[in-house]
Amino acid sequence: MSVSLSAHNDGITGSLQVNGLDQITFANNSASISGNLTVGSNLVGGGIINALSSPSPIGNVSPNSGSFTNLTASGNLGLGVTPNAGWTVNDRVIQGPGTGGSSVALANGNLYTMSNLYYDGTSFRYLGSGLNGSYMSQYLNSFSWYLASGNNTAGSIPSTGLGAPAMALDTHATLSLANPASSGSNYAVCSGCKVISSSSTTDLVEVKSGWTYDKFGADPRARSINLAKKEACISAGYKFEFWIF
């Protein structure tokens, strides 16, 4: 083993060698560890670990080729990829590899999970070309899901899908589905009762199991109560049906 170090105004340069091979090198305010890194009795991994003070990426863990992780100066982490430079500085992001890479972004109480999208502080844009995008937003006690499509080239803003959510779950456990394939109406589910609204009428569909409807045919009294509910809704001007599963 040999050690050769020199002190300078900007840090330390030199190396620590084992059997004539550099194992730790110091240069320009950076340190590189080559080979296996062991902490206590635990083998952390092989390859190269760099910790750099320069701009993006400021740190990475690499095998013999390629890169496992890249940490940028803005605090974003790439797994097998350098995070897109267009992310807003207000988010902290974990981004995966691939043309339509998946990402997790944290910002101001919001948790976003995205596919082929990134947020630049003003608009959502495509990470890669040729694929549509989607994201889910979790904020406090509500969730919203969005489907982005059209104009799908890297860096472009999707032309559709980022206005109203395709699906939303609010703080009252009400699930809303916008424009499902089976109908042009909007759907909202609330405490087992599904409300279908259109411009001209309001339809009610109550979703029940066979057990809660009439105990799978064994409880005529429960069935009559449910049918009475249906008749009352129809008398009040609603269209009503049960969905039994």
Image: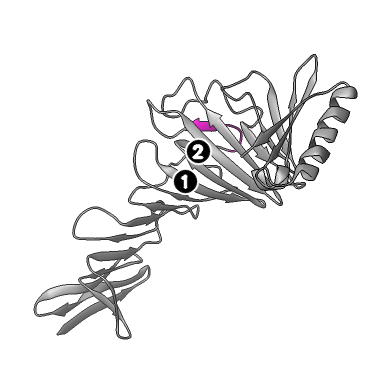
**Mark 1 or 2 closer to N-term?**
1
From the viewer's perspective, tell me whether residue 56 is left or right of residue 230: left
Instruction: Tell me where residue 129 appears, x and y as whole percent.
Output: 38, 27
Is disc 1 surrounded by few (<14), some (14 to 19) or many (20+) residues within 10 Å?
A: many
Q: Which mark is residue 118?
A: 2
Q: Are marks 1 and 2 in contact (CB under 8 Å)?
A: yes
In this rendered view, identify the residue nearer to me: 202 or 34: 202
Instruction: Tell me where residue 242 appears, x and y as whole percent.
Output: 71, 32
From the viewer's perspective, tell me whether residue 49 is left or right of residue 206: left
Q: How is the image coloured?
A: one colour
Q: Does the magenta run of residues contain 13?
A: no
In this rendered view, identify the residue nearer to me: 199 or 58: 199
The residue labelled by disc 1 is 103
Q: Does the magenta run of residues contain 123?
A: yes
Where does the N terminus fall, quadrant-wise? bottom left
Instruction: Tell me where residue 219 appears, x and y as whole percent.
Output: 74, 46
From the viewer's perspective, tell me whether residue 245 is left or right of residue 152: right
Quadrant in which residue 199 is drawn: top right
The CA span between labels 1 and 2 is 8 Å
Image label count: 2
Q: Residue at x 40, y 41 (%)?
A: 101
Q: Which mark is residue 174?
A: none
Q: Residue at x 61, y 33 (%)?
A: 122
Residue that lies at the very extreme toward the right in this rendered image: 236
Q: Is residue 164 visible to us here? A: yes
For the magenta stretch, what is the residue range?
Answer: 121-125
Q: What's the amino acid at mark 1?
A: Ser
In this rendered view, identify the residue nearer to me: 77 or 233: 233
Residue that lies at the very extreme toward the left in this rendered image: 20
Q: What's the amino acid at mark 2?
A: Tyr
